[in-house]
Amino acid sequence: MLFVFGLNFVLFRALPGDPVRAGLRDPRLTPEVQEALRQRFGLDHPLINGVRSLHPWVWGDFWVNPLDTQLAAYLLNVCRGDLGVSYHTGRPVRDMLAEDLVHTVVLLAAGQVLALVLGVALGIVAAWKADTALDPIALVGSLVAWSLPTFWLGIVLLFWGSYQFGLPVAGMSTPGASAWGPGQRLADLARHLLLPTLTYSIVFLGEYVLIMRSTMLEVLAEDYILTAKAKGLSTFQILKDHALRNAMLPMTTLVAMNLGFTVTGAIQIEAVFSWPGLGGAIYEAVARRDYPLLQGAFLLVAVSVIGANLLADLVYRWLDPRVGVD
């Protein structure tokens, strides 16, 4: 996390351009107003002690109070849970990210659950029927689904769903839906969520099927599976009690990594379906040089990845008691 804090500070300040001019994009701004905005957001202070720019040919005075720097202000604010104020909207970054994150989590949760359930089930069936015609069909279908470009698949499903079934093509609610009852609002959300969730699920479904099939084939070749068959256990008992738990170990790592990285990996899906989530906020922040919003989003992604890996370690311990600390 300490490394992430440092990288988070340096990464976006290495971008070219002036955040004040890029963020506001108003040609009427006078130099005096621009300087006042830099003072308001603390951009007039050196980045670190004695360095006023990350570019090697621009250096400042080397005798600056270390506490009177952008780095010190950034670290102190992060420790207080203050991620700053957006250069573009003037709103607290923490509030903006909280709103966008809720929308993204709704999309990711629905897509991940659907992809995981179907991927595990189809992977198990493909491994158990490895010597039948079902296995090559599952392999080819999974490879095709895994190789589809996300934005292309989203556009195809958008046209197909809107034309054939009249599904919504943008946003997460119908204008005026706030006046409806809870049941109607939930149904409206489900209709808006259907196409982006389907896009998200198909993209990850192929990967999950392939990994689950490969892992299950290795587990089914173990001696204890042969022993279970010799005992006369049913196929369902063998898969549920002996094979599935061990085969889920690699899947746990894969799902944990996807949960962390897909917080921003849904940018393309959110852009195609105009979903008001974290991906769209990051895209706009990059275009506007909105450093505080970029820093907050990057920090959120890093925490998500670290937290997902920690969760994977804990689930590993539950799935396989042999995985532990001596």
Image (cartoon, helix red, strand yellow):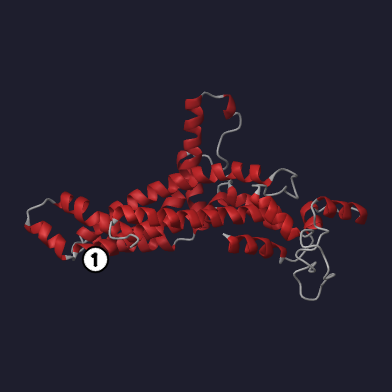
**Residue occupying the point 51% across, 53% down:** 304
Q: In this view, does 262 lie above or below 136?
A: above
**Residue occupying the point 64% across, 51% down:** 79
Closer-to-camera residue (130/102): 102
| Left or right of residue 274, residue 24 in this image | right
Report x, y in % for residue 281.
Answer: 64, 50
Which residue, as the protein is rendered here, is positioned at the far bottom? 57
Report x, y in % for residue 12.
Answer: 69, 62
Residue 147 in view of the camera = yes
| Left or right of residue 231, residue 302 in this image | right
Closer-to-camera residue (40/260): 40
- Image quadrant assignment for residue 177: top right
Q: How many marks?
A: 1
**Residue occupying the point 10% across, 52% down:** 233
- Image quadrant assignment for residue 227: bottom left
**SS assignment at label 1:** helix
Q: Is residue 300 above or below residue 175?
A: below
- Name the image quarter holding the N terminus: bottom right
Q: What residue type is labelled 1?
A: Glu
Closer-to-camera residue (172/169): 172
Closer-to-camera residue (150/67): 67
Residue 163 in view of the camera = no
Within 10 Å of disc 1 (Cα), the crowding (few <14, some 14-19, many 20+) is few
| Left or right of residue 185, residue 87 in this image | right
Report x, y in % for residue 196.
Answer: 49, 47
Report x, y in % for residue 6.
Answer: 64, 63
- Image quadrant assignment for residue 143: bottom left
- Name the image quarter holding the C terminus: bottom left
| Left or right of residue 257, residue 92 in this image | right
Q: Name the residue under label 1.
A: 218
**Residue occupying the point 50% across, 57% down:** 305
